[in-house]
Amino acid sequence: MGQGDNLVQKVAKIWRMHKKQEQGFKSVMSADISNELRRICACGHMSSVLFLNEICTLYESLKNCLEDRDLDSIVMSRTMNLGKDGVKSVLQQLFYTQQDLLNAYNELVEGEVLGGEALLFCQDHFAQLLRLDAFLKKEVRSYELGTKTAYQVVA
């Protein structure tokens, strides 16, 4: 496997993580949550959707048409659903995936294999993901300390 094949796999991995984040943010927004957390999740969701499109374009430019599949053919094996632990568990999953995304982008940016526009938008993604990471870290910490819970419906 050459360096080009490895790069294509890294880009596909980033695409899958963004897809997972998109679904996770959407899942959290479906719960009764604070306005602040809803704003963070909406920002994360929109970023994931936009980044998916840009990463897809990068993947299309790098892939080997005969060997590499289309990203649309990738089936997500597991989605983030609000289970018995609810918002807290999905937020933790989002946070851990966010860490993996940051590491993957760092490898792309520091690896000096990308150039031009691809390098610029990956650096931009990295910077935006770092900002989102700070907000997610704060929210996860709040749920771990028990200072935040999903709102209860009071009628």
Image (cartoon, rainbow, N blue to C red):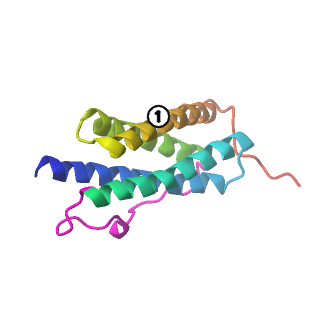
The answer to which quarter of the image holds residue 102 is: top left
Residue 140 in picture, x, y percent from top left = 57, 35
Q: Residue furthest front?
A: 116
> Is 74 inside the magenta-drawn segment?
yes
In the picture, residue 155 is in which quadrant? bottom right
Classify residue 106 as left or right of residue 81.
left
Amino acid carrying label 1: it is: Ala
Choose between 50 and 34: the one closer to the eye. 50
What's drawn in magenta, residue-wise? 62-86
Residue at 34%, 41% in the rendered image: 119
Q: Quadrant of residue 89?
A: top right
- Give the structural element (helix, strand or loop) at label 1: helix
Query: Which residue is at 40% across, 37% downward?
Result: 123
Residue at left 54%, top 32%?
137
Quickly name the residue at label 1.
Answer: 127
Residue at image position (47%, 59%) is 79
Q: Position of residue 83 (x, y in %)?
A: 56, 55
Q: Mark 1 Cα within 10 Å, few/some/many (few <14, many 20+)?
A: some
Observer-nearest of 102 and 92: 102
Q: Residue furthest left?
A: 1
